[in-house]
Image: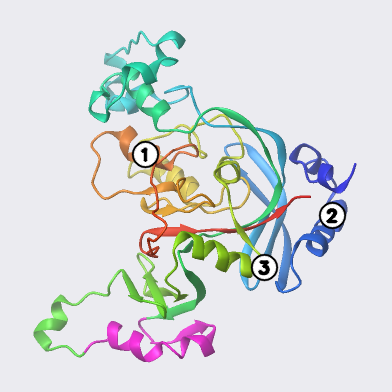
Amino acid sequence: MDLFEQVEWANWKKLKDPEKEELVHQLLMYFVPPTVEVGTIHLVNFELYGIKCRTFELEFDGELFVFIPGNSEAILGWDLGTEGLRSHELLGFDVADLEKNTFKTTLTNETILPVSKWLEEESQYDLTSLEGISGYINDHTTDLRKVAIPAMFVQKYALPAGTEFLGIFDTITGTFEGEVEQFSQYEEIICEQLFPKLSAEQSFAWTFPKSLLVENECYLEFLPESDYYFVYSHNHFTHEELKHAVKRQGFDLLSEDQWEFAVGGGTRRLFRWGNELLIQDNQSGRQIKSKMDGANMFGLVIDTQQNHFELTNDSAKSKLINQLAEKETVIEKMLPLSTYFCSNHMISADKKLSPKEYLYRKVIKIES
């Protein structure tokens, strides 16, 4: 087998650890630009919903990346409606009432396939029936297709658009850990914003802002339930400018196909973590939330807050969603977290990308 065949997932899984290590060092030599500093490399195991992958987590320019094997025949997209999902969750029934209710549907393949012909406007979806929910799901997910996905080094955490991670700022001690020299350029303005001079009365109402943007200088995001901010440098880019900036660093953005494979592994499930939609405040709910927020089967962490779009290399194909209004039904609330969700969000050529609204994830692709 040549190098490209060895990094196919079906073959990669059969390799022994020393063979994987030798192979990944070849990939680093041939595909990672010499301007990119390669840091620590670790063999790690990832698992989600029974799908396991033993792969590498490594640092490029101080940022975490994971190696994702390729798949020349990946099946992506969705046309199965509510298949695999739980009817009582979709229809809003309490689990305690299950024994007293039966759920019937006339849903058939014949009903699903021509759904685009009889559901044209958002208001026409009947989200109180499985038929209507199936139509809604199929129309808001990408088309079923077979595609070739190259092996890739993919950034583990997406970054706010136009930013580079500098470090962490502690609001209790006022100390910073990370790229101290770069942070020092912004320290005065950050401290002015986070520690304003307040009267005794004003101090009672003061809370730290969720984010702080000083355009073309720095951007801060508060970590929920902590005393810390993530600190980033910031440049105000359009989508095309961001692509060029990433390219100059030796990276690319993922295509929509590559994003869907990297997030869901090409599995035939609507959600990467399983079929659960209702996240209750109990032990089971916390376990589901842990799967949603934790690393996926390839080691990537995907934003679940629904307050950002994640960019691809196509300005007309953003993933995830910036959900501005609270939705009523569970499928409307949860579908944007689906691997195959299609937001139909278009970014105009001259729009500057706000880090409060957009995320991006760098990649190095193993292509001939």
**Bounds of the magenta segment:** 171-196
Q: Earlier in the sequence, mark 2 or mark 3?
A: 2
Q: Which residue is mark 1?
A: 334
* Disc 2 packing (10 Å; few <14; some 14–19; many ≥20): some
Nearer the observer, 314 or 307? 314
Q: Amino acid at mark 1?
A: Met
Q: CA distance from mark 2 to mark 1?
A: 39 Å
Image location of residue 314, percent across then percent down = 51, 49
Q: Which mark is residue 23?
A: 2
The magenta stretch spans residue 181: yes
Give yes or no for contact between labels 1 and 3 (Cβ–Cβ under 8 Å). Answer: no
* Disc 1 packing (10 Å; few <14; some 14–19; many ≥20): some
Q: How is the image coloured?
A: rainbow
Q: Which residue is mark 3?
A: 59
Residue 6 in sight here: yes
Q: CA distance from mark 1 to mark 3?
A: 32 Å
Q: CA distance from mark 2 to mark 3?
A: 17 Å
Q: Is residue 45 left or right of residue 279?
A: right
